[in-house]
Amino acid sequence: MELLKIDHIEKYYGSRSSLTKAIDDISLSIAEGEFTAIMGASGSGKTTLLNVISTIDRVTAGHIFLEKTDITELKGKELNKFRRDKLGFIFQDFNLLDTLTAYENIALALTIKRLGFKEIDEAVNRVVAQLEITDVLQKYPYQMSGGQKQRVASARAIVTSPKLVLADEPTGALDSKSAKLLLERFSFLNRENKATILMVTHDSFTASYARRVVFIKDGKVFSELSRGDNTRKQFFDRIIDVVTLLGGDVSDAL
Amino acid sequence: MLFKLTVSNIKKSLRDYAVYFFTLIIGVSIFYVFNAIESQTAYLNVSRDTREVIKIINKILSGVSVFVAVVLGLLIVYASRFLMKRRNREFALYLTLGMSKSRISLLLLTETVMIGAGSLVAGLLIGAGLSQVSSALVASLFEADMSEYHFNISQSAIVKTLIYFGIMYLVVMLFNTVMIGRRKLIDLMNAGKRSEELKVKNPVVCVIMFMIAAAALGFAYYMVGWRTTELEESTFFTYIAIGCVSTFLIFRSVSGLMLRIFMSAKSVYYKGLGSFTFRQLSSKVNTMVFSMTLICLMLFVTICALCSAFTIRNSLNRVLNECCPADYQAVMSMYYNGEEYMVLDYIPLDDEKIYEEAGIDPEDYFEEYALTRAVYDSSLNYEGFYGEYLDELLALDDDDSDGGLDLQEEPLISITDYNKLMEIYGREKETLGENEYFELCNVKKSEVPRNYMLKKGKEITAFGVTLKPKYDECINGVIELFDSYNNVGVTVVPDSVAAKAEAGVYYLTGNFNTDDKQKISSYIQKLSSEAPNPVLSALNKEYEKYDDQSIGFTYYAVTKRQFGEANIGIKALVTFLGLYVGVVFLITSGAVLALRSLSDASDSIGRYEMLRKIGADERDIDHSLFLQTVMFFALPLLLAIFHSLFGMKFAYFFLGMYGVTAIIPSILMTGGIILFIFGGYFLITYICSRLIIKSEIR
């Protein structure tokens, strides 16, 4: 079933004299329960795409539908409500509140929905078990490793059971071991919880954990890969092939 | 180029600098206003005595100015260092671009000069304007005519302000130069990354620390507030020190304590942005425990200073009207001296004749007057007066009314004389049966034993006549005029009893028959007890008749005017001092809190962004910011108010002689000033913080 429908969107920056087309007519459809990666070099427009989907930025033209709601039409309070109820965010630099403990950071996503404490506590305990971070709950972000922080951030993103989890370079600030751990958790959440995950990355290894990869170049969809029955290793090799074709910075892509 | 950079720097960091600049301007203008009082008073048309008082006040004010300058200087150094820290990254950029450290110092120098010059000009302009308003206050305080007053600008105050603030700015420049010189490039570059570790405190330790601090405070409060009479200088300072240390400990432990409380009230803590609000606030408080303590203590001093000043000011007039209900009173007596100038026995005087001989006809001066006398029965001394109740009263006395029992001989006055005086004082008259008496008193500690006896129906024997009390408590009133409560007790007896005494102390009491100030001055000159005085010489003539070395005589006169003028000085002094110190402390505390809050807001932009991304309501975010700001300002203020409750109890003990009558208006006025200045800082802080965290919204 179709969850997200991106319909001919465009995003321009600058004035008429010096126009930058960050997104130049992209259409995309994502089904419920899909784990999708969007790949592209720096400046390809992938982060802008994520921003307009997450309603942090507005499109210049086109429409985005999430479950029949046109999110490009939402305003003010509706926007906040939409983000709160439908979306989960994971950022490259974790974006945890450094003054709050891991538990409080995760609970925050629920407290702003004004749930009762019992509900909050149950939900938090459920996701921390899935993400294997039970032992860091009472720690502050500065007491945790990068991988732990990112898993706490992921817990915050999924604790509300959002329709769509958006991850912006989730492994960008992690060492390879932590990155692997995190991505395995993503796969687990996608498999067991049927979470729909949309991840933006320029890293082929990270992308190879997804079920589907969309390549973007200069604001346009360049090509698309589906993992099918491939092993992760095979899928990784196929991605590398496309990246080479894309002509992106190879060292960057690896 | 350097100049351009400076200007654009100031413009860019205007948001950070606004509060700093604003505070500098207020500081300069306050400093000017209080130093300009000297030249304002020079124009006032006041009496010679008041002129002397003004001189003393100006000396005290200029002494306090030095103290104020030190406080403001510390504030400026603190604020500029604080703002400098925020610009470390900028300096790092200059250094990496190849600018030399001395060049950067020069840049900072130019900035300080520009900010300093700007604030001085603006502050002096505002100060000059304010001082025209304050001159009205000055004139009214000294009860001088406003008609002779003209617009004036005090050159000496301007010069003084320029010198004092010039020195402060020089110190700031020195600090900045040293700071830039000592920092390494790598430190400056990394300064932006918040390496500030949050010290996690054990909530249990915090709770214990808080309890200890609260107990210590309670003890200090008790000793100062309730054991006031037992205080000695050294122990008093020990209690002050206990108070300061406890305050520090409370600020250190309060966030841990709150956390502990919230942990048991999870439904409050995990509601909306509750946890975020609390953690933001507690991290702010935890990183500035020392500043919070200083702010709290400054606010405490401010509240006590303002409250005491207003109480004295408000009470003085009322007390004067109560204790000095007539314009003039002369007292004369002649007596046999005993040991150590104890009066053994009074000698009868014909007061009417003495005034006649002196050539003074009261009809010429007074609209209404009375010649009365107070008589003494030597049997009504300490033992005789308290009689069988002495032991009980002594036991009662142990508690708190020290000295309330002191008595040599009880003064007695006849009901007729009493009513004559009340006629002049404009008070209610009394009637008295043939074997009755009642008592007059207005000193609290003396009232206690007297009321105790009156309630028990204590009979007294005056000149062999036994009298019963008419009322079961003392009437609040006076016979002798004075400027504060000092009537420790007078007994009013039937005429027949008082008539048994041959002699006593003779009073001439009256209200002048004019309101004209000049005329009253000439009356006072003629009627004052200063030699040469016709009454004095008439009395002397009488004295010479006896030719006895053991005889002495007394003559003195008091006027309401003289008491009033003494009050003017006290009123003006306490008002100026209270306002000066209070306002300076208020802007200092307000500025520190505001600077800290604003910088915190810009450091937290990212956090608020995050909250928006995960979908927090804009209203919740505003609410959280409001709560944080309110609590941050309220925390030191609340503790200061709490301190003040006991501080004022202590102060009122000493102000008792002025009569603490106008407490509510004093508290209201103090509250008003604090609300205006401190509240103003709060409002500016909240509005600016909102702008800062809003500015990033797309």
Image (cartoon, rainbow, N blue to C red):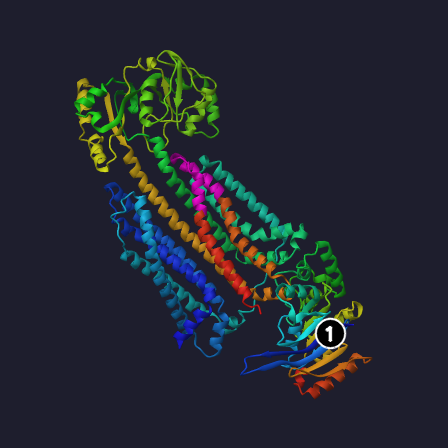
Which chain does tag 1 point to? Answer: A
The relative height of residue A154 versus residue B94 in the rendered view (above or below) is above
Front residue of this view, candidates B204 and B461: B461
The relative height of residue B406 versus residue B130 in the rendered view (above or below) is above
Look at label 1 and name its amino acid. Answer: Lys
Q: Which residue is mark 1?
A: A180
Image position, residue A41 (x, y; %): 65, 82
Tell me if residue B61 is in the magenta stretch: no
Give residue B79's quadrant in the image: bottom left
Give residue B108's quadrant in the image: bottom left
Residues rendered magenta in the picture: B644-671
**Quadrant of the snapshot with the C terminus of chain B:** bottom right
State left or right for residue A128 relative to residue B580. Answer: right
Front residue of this view, candidates B506 and B476: B476
Give the farthest residue toward the top: B464
For residue A176, say whether it is visible: no
State left or right for residue B356 relative to residue B593. Answer: left
What secondary structure do most residues of the magenta stretch adopt? helix
